[in-house]
Structure formats: C-alpha cells, structure tokens
Image (cartoon, rainbow, N blue to C red):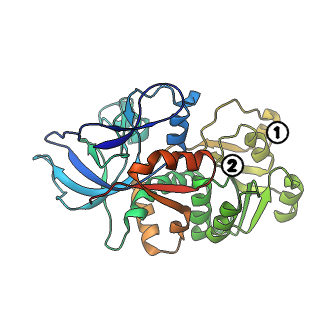
Amino acid sequence: MKAIIKESPGEGVRLKDVPIPSIGLHDILVGVTASGICGSDLSISQWKESYRHIPLPMVLGHEFSGKVVCKGVEVQGLEEGDRVTVNPVIACGQCKPCRMGLKDDCERRLILGFTKDGSFAPYVSVPKGASVFRLPNGFSDQMGALVEPFAVAYHAIELSRFKTDDRVCVLGMGPIGLMIIGLLKELGASLIVVIGRTLQEKRIEIAKEMGADLILDIHRDDLNRITRERTEGGGFDIVFEATGNPFSLPQGLEMTRKGGEMVLSGIFEGRGEILLTEFVRGSKRLIGNHAYEDATWFKVIELLSKGKIPAKKLITQELPLSEGLEAFDLLKNRQGVKVLLRPSGF
C-alpha cells in the first residue's frame, strides 16, 4: 500500500510503498476513510527541532476516521464494519501516571503517527489499549477526522476555569484556534476577541462563522487599548494561546485580567519571556495544554453531533492520498486551513 512517510532527517516527506500492517490477537485493523494533516505533521515534515525525537522511518497521521476491517480474536465490543475514530495516544495502563488516570502522561505511551505508524495510509493498525470510539449515525467521515483536534481545543477549555459569560481572547487563527472559538461560542462566552494576521481572509471568514465577535491584527491594532475598551479596563478572563509563537506569551499575559489565566496550546520553537513580578502580583495562572482525556472525546463527539458548530467550514481541501505531497505544500504555503486526505476503497 502507499503511505506518506517521514523516512529520514531533513526537509520533506515521501509517498512510498509499505506493507499492510499486521495485527495481533488484541488489535484491530482500520481502513482509513479520512485523515487530517495536523500542524505537527507539517513540523515533522520540516524536521523542526521540537519533533526530532520521533523515530524514523514513520508513517505519519493521527487525526482520522475509518472502518474496522479486521479484528483480533480477543477483541470485544467492536465488530467489522464499525465506523470509528481513535485516540492516537495509547497508554500502558501500568505506570504511575496511568494508575492516576493521567493517560496522556504515560511513561511508556505509544502515539499513532509519532511512535507507531499512523493514518496517512489506507490501513492503520490500532493496538491493544487504544481507545476506539464508534461514530454516531449521520456523523460524517470528515467530522470523524476532526474529533482529535477538536479534543485538543476542548481540553484547553476544560483545563481553564471557563464559565458562561466570560470574556475571552484567542491568539491565532490556525485550526486549533478556530476550533476553540467555535467551542467557546457554543459554551456561552459573552465576548470572543481573536488576534491574528488579517491578511488571512479565509481564516477571518471562518473565525467569524465560528463566533468571533472582534478580529484584531497583531501588527496593526493597539491590542492593549482595545483590550481595555472591551473589558472595562480589567482584561480578559481567559486568553487562549494557539500560535506557538514565543512573542505571544508576554502579550497574552498583559491582556489577562488580575486573577485570570492564559492557556497555552501551541508548540513553541523558542523561549518566551514574561514579566514575572506582574505575573505574580496579578495572581495570574499559566496553563499548559497538551492532548486530552478519553472523556474529552465523548464530549466533543456529542457537541459535534448537535451540528451547532460549523466545523465543516474548517475543511478547505480534500485530496486523495496519492496527492498527499501536494496537500503538505498547500499548508506549507498557507493556502489551506484543515486539509483532509482520503484513501480510496472504503
């Protein structure tokens, strides 16, 4: 089968023939129907410093939906033909973080597309211990591939002290930032201000459809003045950072009210500096968000099933797997928001 693989250090990925993965007694084989390209996949392709720990060669891809085409004889609760999405983080279940219920902190975890071959292929082998979620009737393959990044976005809100009517700010109009906007709107935020680059017309359009009340340009607008005006001088209850740009850290904290919080979901390539005295005297909280819990996935599937969040607007291109390299180029050149790959035959 053809798969998109990161084969060696340096720039780029390849479309290459690889064997169909085998499965064991406790595993399932999923035929991939849709798989989204994540910003982390692009960073791996570019071989950025923060992703150079990944073992190579590796079939990339971790945001996906598909059908169970084969299952091990010991697998229970799933049947061939079931439409599913899969939490790509597979915990050992035995280490101390696992025993504490902290699956994402597992000391021996596997991650599809990072430490075990992933979903940019017609088939992906899902091992014992993975959390597999059936998709509801009417839940499209495309939505199934969006559950994973929406879970990242939702977990950012879960980690915060968000409450209905909070005034919030979202830094960044990438997929995670746009998803956070849609979720905040659905959960009842009273004011959603988004900061990005207003040259990105398509992303502005999607941000508005997701529920942004005001969109500011980080280079052109007086962010601190507008923050004071829109928050009665106090600052935002919560600032959600979704850029990974180190310069957003001091700016976001400055816009956070006393006693407020800033949640970081971006993967940073450099150091960020903050004024620690202002941070301490303001009794502010800084929270790191990485991945999710299984409970988050159930909540996201339920929310997306209601159809109130215009999630499909995020999908700007759908391409066959054979055009996967072109799909990476689209994102590299900022010509897409969420690009899905569609292996054929399922």
Q: Say the numbered circle drawn on residue 226.
A: none
- Say whether residue 102 is visible: no
* Residue 67: % across, % down: 26, 58
Q: What residue type is labelled 2?
A: Glu
Are there few (<14), some (14-19), or many (20+) residues within 10 Å of tag 2? Answer: many
Element carrying mark 1: helix
Going from the N terminus, do you reach mark 2 or mark 1 first? Answer: 2
User: 336 or 63, which lies in front?
Assistant: 336
Distance from the alpha carbon under mark 2 to that under mark 1: 13 Å
- Give the residue drawn at x 26%, y 51%: 30
- Give the residue drawn at x 9%, y 47%: 73
Element carrying mark 2: strand
* Residue 238: % across, % down: 69, 54
* Residue 132: % across, % down: 30, 53
Q: Name the residue under label 2.
A: 261
- Say whether residue 122 is visible: yes
Q: Name the residue under label 1.
A: 278
Dividing the picture into quadrants, the one containing residue 251 is top right
Q: Which amino acid does label 1 sit on?
A: Glu
Quadrant of the rendering where the C terminus is positioned: bottom left
User: 319 or 218, which lies in front?
Assistant: 319
User: 253 or 63, which lies in front?
Assistant: 63
Are there few (<14), some (14-19), or many (20+) residues within 10 Å of tag 1? Answer: few
